[in-house]
Image: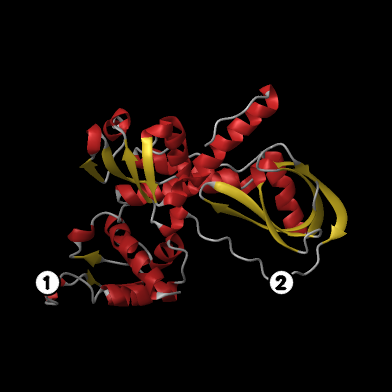
């Protein structure tokens, strides 16, 4: 146990004990999943806590004699902690986004638990319609096969579509892990053909076949480099033309500065990079610039891919992006 764990428990314990006067030590310990000895240690800390000043009337009052000899808890003079601490709106939204991302990344019991927790948090905070999440994690079946291969340490044969969707490769790899960057899930694996670590977008893996061979030891998995979302604390600045300034009325902005010809420079907080990609694709050339520049790479790549796929289907010369 760390001091941080204890502080969090004490903040929840005071309103609990006020709501259950005369509760038994054993029952309270069971409610917080700790031993009776730890609960008594917590009470010894609590009765030295209170409001600034440190005078007797400022401190929480606990009958320690009753707690140790009779096994019951009487707590008073703590009206200022009548309710458990609650999430702030920002904390609730951040946790909700994280839970929904976990639900999209995992399968089986983990997915069910994440979805259940997200639904309960949404109901408790009233954030049902305020949080939208879009991540690219590929097909559930593909993700389940990869997860099973990683857990069983089995080599797999992939059918993998390249970035342009015009080339397909069939690498044999030793799968090692799945990571998320900028709302896109990647498989990290050792490529037998390349003799090195490679990353594969899971939404571009068409098929996974287990080869029946165990994976080799290739050392620690390298970390994916941080994306723009990690490096910029989720903030982006868009230079918009006059025709695109309608977004200021639809999305909350951190700052707006008037620009030339009726345009504007707008700072947005981005909780989900996929939202930004969708907005940039929608606005197109009405966005003069994006800062940081790397924040527009995913949208640019998606636009190029759409043009390349159109060329494959209908032929002709695509315009430059």
Residue position for label 1: 57
| Number of numbered discs | 2
Residue found at x 39% / y 35%:
128
Of residue 71 and residue 199, the one placed in the foreground of this image is: 199
Side of 259 relative to 157 (left or right): left
Residue found at x 35% / y 73%:
42
In which quadrant of the rendered image does the N terminus lie?
bottom left
Is label 1 or label 2 in front? 2
Give percent across and percent down for residue 130.
36, 36
Q: Quadrant of residue 303?
A: top right
Give percent across and percent down for residue 271.
40, 46
The image shows residue 181, relative to residue 161, as above or below, that is: below
The image shows residue 116, relative to residue 312, as above or below, that is: below
Of residue 227 and residue 27, the one placed in the foreground of this image is: 227
- Residue 219: mark: 2
Side of 223 relative to 234 (left or right): right
Give percent across and percent down for residue 241.
31, 34
């Amino acid at each position: 146990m760390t001091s941080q764990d204890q502080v969090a428990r004490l903040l929840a314990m005071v309103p609990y004990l006020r709501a259950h006067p005369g509760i038994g030590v054993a029952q309270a310990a069971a409610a917080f999943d700790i031993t009776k000895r730890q609960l008594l240690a917590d009470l010894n800390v609590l009765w030295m806590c209170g409001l600034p000043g440190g005078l007797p009337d400022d401190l929480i009052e606990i009958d320690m004699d009753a707690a140790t000899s009779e096994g019951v808890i009487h707590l008073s003079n703590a009206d200022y902690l009548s309710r458990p601490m609650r999430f702030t709106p920002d904390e609730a939204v951040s946790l909700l986004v994280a839970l929904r991302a976990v639900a999209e990344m995992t399968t089986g019991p983990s997915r069910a638990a994440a979805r259940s927790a997200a639904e309960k948090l949404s109901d408790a905070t009233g954030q049902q319609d305020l949080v939208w999440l879009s991540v690219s994690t590929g097909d559930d079946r593909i993700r389940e096969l990869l997860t099973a291969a990683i857990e069983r340490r089995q080599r797999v044969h992939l059918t993998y579509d390249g970035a342009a969707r015009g080339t397909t490769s069939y690498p044999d790899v030793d799968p090692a892990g799945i990571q998320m960057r900028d709302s896109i899930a990647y498989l990290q694996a050792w490529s037998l053909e390349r003799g090195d670590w490679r990353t594969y977008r899971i939404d571009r893996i068409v098929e996974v076949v287990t080869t029946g061979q165990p994976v080799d030891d290739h050392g620690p998995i390298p970390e994916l480099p941080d994306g723009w979302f990690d490096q910029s604390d989720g903030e982006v600045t868009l230079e918009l033309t006059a025709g695109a300034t309608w977004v200021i009325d639809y999305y909350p902005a951190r700052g707006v500065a008037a620009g030339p010809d009726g345009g504007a420079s707008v700072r947005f907080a981005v909780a989900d990079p996929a939202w930004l990609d969708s907005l940039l694709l929608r606005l197109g050339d009405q966005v003069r610039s994006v800062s940081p520049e790397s924040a527009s790479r995913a949208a640019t790549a998606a636009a190029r891919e759409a043009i390349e796929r159109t060329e494959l289907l209908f032929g002709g010369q695509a315009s430059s992006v």
